[in-house]
Image: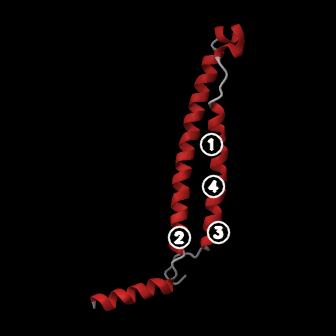
Amino acid sequence: MPDGGFDVDPDEIDAHAKQVEDILARLKTAIDADDKRVDAMAFGAVGVACGLYLWCNSTADRTRETLETAVKSGEHHVDAVHTWAKARRVDEQTASDLLKQAGTTHG
């Protein structure tokens, strides 16, 4: 690329976004599964008495927070990648034509 940047095919950029979207779908499935947590009695009397339920619940809460943060970050990444692909589709000739048109309008 003459400007010292790098050239990436916009279709490849979109393919990357699709891969990230697929991963996000799996993370969202994991979050949805958390909505079906078992109650304290599923651990039995000994599990409840030992605090096993509280430990599991606390771990599940932290895991859910991590997954939700990953999904939010992933969605931001996908939006940015789609914007990048869209910008790459504006070829140099189109940009040049726009600059020429602006020059004749203001020049």
Which residue is depicted at the point 62% across and 30% down?
A: 35
Q: Could you tell which of marks 3 and 1 lies nearer the N-terminus? A: 3
Q: Amino acid at mark 3?
A: Glu
**Quadrant housing residue 13:** bottom right
Question: How far apart are the two marked residues, 3 and 2, measured between alpha carbons?
Answer: 12 Å
N-term-proximal mark, 4 vs 2: 4
- Percent of width and height locating residue 79: 52, 58
The crowding category of the residue bearing disc 2, from other C-alpha atoms within 10 Å (few below 14, some 14 to 19, many at least 20), is: some
Q: Position of residue 60 (x, y in %)?
A: 61, 28
Whether pointer 3 and pointer 4 mark residues with C-beta atoms closer than 8 Å, the reply is: no
Point 64% across, 69% down: residue: 12
Residues under numbered marks 1 and 4 in contact, where contact means CB atoms less than 8 Å apart: no
What residue is at 65 percent from the left and 15 percent from the top?
40
- Residue 11, relative to residue 55: is it above or below? below
Where does label 2 land, which residue?
A: 86
Circle number at residue 12: 3
Residue indicated by mark 4: 20
Amino acid type of disc 4? Val
- The amino acid on which the numbered mark 2 sits, given as a three-letter code, is Lys
User: In the rendered structure, which disc, 3 or 4, sits on the residue that comes first in sequence?
Assistant: 3
Q: Please give the residue where the numbered disc 1 appears in the rendered image.
A: 28
| Alpha carbons under labels 1 and 4: distance apart | 12 Å
